[in-house]
Amino acid sequence: MTMTSKQDTRTIDVALGQRSYPVWIGQGLLDDHTRWRSALRGRHALVISNRTVAPLYLERVAKGLDGLQWSPFLIDDGEAHKTFANVGLALEALAQLGATRDACVVALGGGVVGDLAGFSAACWMRGIDFIQMPTTLLAMVDSSVGGKTGVNLPAGKNLVGAFHQPRAVVADIDTLATLPQREYRAGLAEVVKGAAIGDLPFFEWLERHADALAARETAPLIEAIARKVQYKAGVVARDETEQGERALLNLGHTFGHALEAAGKYTTTLLHGEGVAVGMLLAAQLSERLGMSQAADTARLHRLLTTLGLPTAIPPGMDPEQLLALMRLDKKNTAGTLRLILWRGVGKAEIVSGVAEDAVLATLRDAITA
């Protein structure tokens, strides 16, 4: 990361009726104990992290928990560990801690940790507080905001979960300095996604600042995170439980989740990489259906490539299997595919009853390209 002088902390409020919570974005926030400690209301805390992140940052968080009864709960790193088995172990850890209804779960890690921690918090005593401390760009701009929690099944990703909003999100961009380049780039896919859905000026800004973002320059990075979070916060405020507009945030996800499941949640594709390929497939399908132009697809392809993101389906994947996995997507209704497509940059929409032959043709063309 290219570090400049310390940037001021940006605060974005996610307003949900009479409820709201802050998303803090800046440098040195894990050490800003006065700020985030105020979000803990009780005497007990369980810090859920993984064995990669904990050695780097757990000690800093622990200093802010001084005086509380708390314990760490660590899982192995990776999407394959977002399971019911680990939720069960996390709940056992809460029991061992003697956690009461005013306890708090702290999620220190990426999206896997945040999803599992939030779901565990939603289950314990029918719902206790939790705080998101995302340490990946992907989690900062997407999964830590909005209250979606869950675990995977062999049949598909995030098929089990709950809407459970955090008390606060602490996005300390200093943690991105230890993030591998591939994971950092994967997070940029979610930034692009927000702009592609409904923010043409932001997409144009990303095109102008793509090289700076790829180089991890601090000021553009904070600006990109803040703009993506602000966009998502507005959508979540209008549609918390995904009854309508919030479904647009899944642009590329139906394709992407199928790609991840086909790869058995291994290193074949990271989630953000799946979203990048999935967005491009959605654009290609939109073009096939006459909803958008080839120039729109090319523009998205160009930005993703500049940011170092993959745009091709991994070798060896079967289009028929991918289509079968797409049929399990949570957005589908009445046995028909319901996809997020677009009419060009910034003009995404929900399309029901998408013809499977068009989807299959798009997948086949992408695989043979």
Image (cartoon, rainbow, N blue to C red):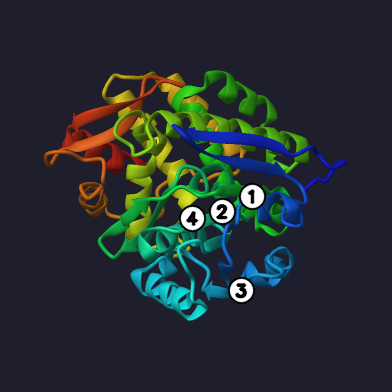
Residue 360 lies, in percent from the top left, at: 23, 41
Point out which mark residue 270 bears.
4
Label 4: few (<14), some or many (≥20) within 10 Å?
many
- Nearer-the-camera pick, 235 or 159: 235
Kind of element beneath mark 4: loop
Point out which mark residue 132 bears.
2
- Label 1 and label 3: CA atoms lie apart by 21 Å
Residue drawn at (63%, 67%), measured in percent from left and top? 53
- Label 2 and label 3: CA atoms lie apart by 19 Å
Identify the residue position indicated by label 3 in the image.
Answer: 69
- Label 2 and label 1: CA atoms lie apart by 6 Å
Give the residue furthest to the right: 5
Identify the residue position indicated by label 1 in the image.
Answer: 170
Q: Does the rendering let one see residue 229? A: no
Mark 3 or 4, closer to the camera: 3
Mark before the other along the chain sequence, 1 or 3:
3
Kind of element beneath mark 2: strand
Q: Examine the rendered structure and indicate whether residue 7 appears above or below residue 77.
A: above
Do the residues bearing badges 1 and 3 touch, measured as CB atoms within 8 Å? no
Give amino acid for label 2.
Gln
Mark before the other along the chain sequence, 2 or 1:
2
Residue 147 lies, in percent from the top left, at: 44, 47
Residue drawn at (48%, 55%), measured in percent from left and top? 270
Point out which mark residue 93 bears.
none
Do the residues bearing badges 3 and 4 touch, measured as CB atoms within 8 Å? no
Residue drawn at (38%, 38%), measured in percent from left and top? 250
